[in-house]
Image: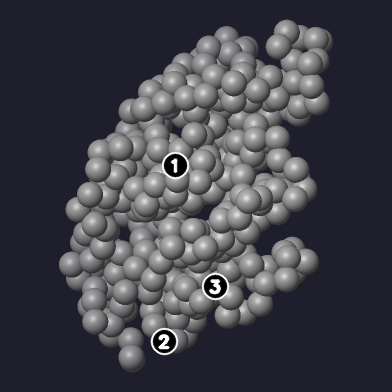
Amino acid sequence: MKFLDLHAQYLSIRKDIDRAIQQTLESSEFIMGKSVFELEKKIASYCGVRYGISLNSGTDALYLALRALNLKVSDEVIVPAFTFFATAEVVALAGATPVFADITPGSFTIDPVSVEKKITKKTRAIMPVHLYGELADMRALMGLSRAHNIPIIEDAAQALGASLNGEKACSFGSMGCISFFPSKNLGAYGDGGMLVTNDERVATFARMWRVHGSEQKYNNIFIGDSSRLDNIQAAILLAKFPHLDTWNAKRAEKAALYNSLLDNRRYGLPIPTPASRHIYHQYTIRVRNGRDRMKEALANANIPTMVYYPTPLHLQKAFTHLGYHRGDLPESERACTEVLSLPIYPELADDDIRHVVEVLNSLPQ
Ligand SMILES: *Cc1c(COP(=O)(O)O)cnc(C)c1O
């Protein structure tokens, strides 16, 4: 069994992918071509926002969202401690200070109560992460955003297509950040990302930044960088995009099967609220005792699992200078010892899920 089978997905859409690559080669238009702009339009409209600016990676999308805020060293950006490193890394890269908030015990996303406690006069942004494909508590977070006049940047790297009360990820905050890393629900065959926003000023800034701060070639207005999604990746993503909703729905079906078979007294199961459309980038359970032992036993039975993430960001070596200690963010720390992600992808056979559950249920408590 595989943890993720990108080859199975390729086989299911091989003709379209091969044609997309072939057409790009024939056009020999590799950078900033038609496919790139078509993809930007489609993704922005899918998210329900006006502008999409494709970039090299999801990390660059997060970084640019912050750069658009013109942060100073003393400025603070609130991020969850339980997420992929990039979410906090970009705050430091953009020249400001990440401030870590805890997650809620019932989900894996940032706790609005913890966020409120961390708001100071220096807070310039709040960055919720829609971890594993489920939206953070955007109702409460948008309330805080309005009350304190602090913009929200959504890290939707794992959540393209997820929604809450019918509203899509990236449509709540002032900016949304998407990743097309190959393993994401809409993955390229290389790196890629997109910043989406309704703010024309931000869109213009990002479009110029990715081409060295220029509007027209060789007329550089500010210091930017080189960060573009190339045409081959855009063409591949355009070929995959029509399948995204079906793939996300299939993941949700697989998750529902896991949820129905796993013993919810023994494991914490990811059961979404009815208002939430979870797209199960990961299917992650909580194992309250002996997670690592269980992971090893599953590996011995040829069932690959992953721990996303083993270390909370406030305890990462790279952030020791911020002075956090163990015990500061207990829910994030606890999640790191309990989480176990099981195989999930649209092509995964239901019998494989049954097999995983059988093995899990047969392990000693
Ligand atoms: C994947 C991911 C990123 C970074 O995206 P890249 O395209 O790999 O740079 C950022 N945040 C989260 C939560 C992610 O899962």
Cα distance between the residues tagged 1 and 3: 25 Å
Is residue 184 visible in the rendered image? The answer is no
Which residue is label 1 attached to?
146
Q: Is residue 278 above or below residue 363?
A: above
Q: Which mark is residue 329?
A: 3
Residue found at x 51% / y 76% = 330
Q: Which mark is first along the chain, 3 or 1?
A: 1
Q: Position of residue 69 (x, y in %)?
A: 65, 35
45 or 26: nearer the eye? 45
Quarter of the figure that contains the N terminus: bottom left
* Dot 1 and dot 2 residues touching (CB under 8 Å): no
Q: Residue at x 61, y 30 (%)?
A: 55
* Residue type highlighted by circle 2: Asn
**SS assignment at label 2:** loop
Q: Nearer the viewer, residue 114 or 336?
A: 114
Q: From what the image shows, is residue 127 above or below residue 234?
A: below
Between 319 and 68, which is closer to the camera in this rendering? 68
Q: Position of residue 66 (x, y in %)?
A: 64, 39
Q: Quadrant of residue 36?
A: top right
Q: Is residue 82 shown left or right of residue 275?
A: right
Q: Position of residue 321 (x, y in %)?
A: 78, 66
**Which one is closest to the eye, mark 1 or mark 3?**
1
Label 1 neighbourhood size at 10 Å, few (<14), some (14-19), many (20+)?
few
Q: Position of residue 188 (x, y in %)?
A: 51, 36
Q: Is residue 232 left or right of residue 104?
A: right
Can residue 104 be seen here? The reply is yes
Q: Amino acid at mark 3?
A: Leu
Mark 3 or mark 2: whose residue is earlier in sequence: 2
Badge 2: residue crowd in 10 Å (few <14, some 14–19, many ≥20): few
**Which residue, given by chain and number where applicable, does mark 2 sit on?**
289
Give the mark nearest the N terminus, 1 or 2: 1
